[in-house]
Image (cartoon, grey):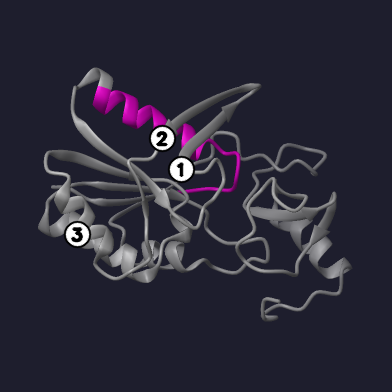
Amino acid sequence: MPKLYYRYAVMNAGKSTQLLQIAHDYESNNGEKILALKPESDTKADNHIIARIGSDMLKRKCDFLIKRDSNWLYDEVVKHSGTKVVLIDEAQFLSKANVWDCARIVTQLEIPVICFGLKCDFRGEPFEGSSYLFALAQDIEEVTTRAICRRSENPVKATVNMRLVNGVPAFRGGQLSIEGENDVVYEPVCLKKFMEMFIAGNNTYGEKYE
């Protein structure tokens, strides 16, 4: 039976690499049609899904970018007859309506949907898309391929993404800020290091976004 899958992890843990591998397996090894997608709000690499392995970069053009409108994703998948699986990168940026469309695709069109994304944002707050995927997905799994805290003296699993602006930890600003734009980068860290930085900056849990 087709399922709605959510594969989550911190950044740089290998999520996009897994997605591209699945796409390759379906297309090259099995000769089957897939849809590789991401939300249109993710402007990184324009309309491509990218994955970095060392100094190398894997890249694939999206079949289309997902709009946030209700029923839009479901209707678009219906137009692509013969699709065997739908793969979605950066799924934390999906809207509630998009996730419900994913559930409809699985149950009504009987096409599996595999989503890859983050659990929470740079302030420890949930994303709309990941919240509803945790609620509706039938199969949820953490991707831990390269999820190691960069700031711990000993190897510790990273569970949170910390935003750096000009190299300085930042806990204020809008939720959507693409890495590589406006001097923003993200660093996977363990909860202990995240909390140390959060408290040191006199940040308050539950503050509204600027």
Q: Is residue 118 above or below residue 61?
A: below
Element assignment for label 1 = loop
Q: Is residue 14 magenta?
A: yes
Mark 3 → mark 1, Cα distance in angstroms: 20 Å
Element assignment for label 3 = helix
The answer to the question of whether label 2 and label 3 lie on touching residues, with beta carbons closer than 8 A, is no
Residue bearing the label numbered 2: 61
Magenta range is 8-27
Give, as a three-letter code, the residue at label 3: Asp
Query: Is residue 159 shown left or right of residue 89?
Result: right
Location of residue 171 in the rendering, given as x and y in whole percent from the top left corner: 76, 66
Query: Which image quadrant is residue 30 in?
Result: top left
Element assignment for label 2 = strand
Location of residue 37 in the rendering, given as x and y in whole percent from the top left corner: 36, 45
Residue bearing the label numbered 3: 75
Q: Nearer the viewer, residue 186 or 156?
A: 186
Give, as a three-letter code, the residue at label 1: Asn
Residue found at x 64% / y 44%: 157
Residue bearing the label numbered 1: 47
Q: Local crowd at mark 3 within 10 Å, few (<14), some, or many (≥20)?
A: few
Mark 2 → mark 3, Cα distance in angstroms: 21 Å
Mark 2 → mark 1, Cα distance in angstroms: 6 Å
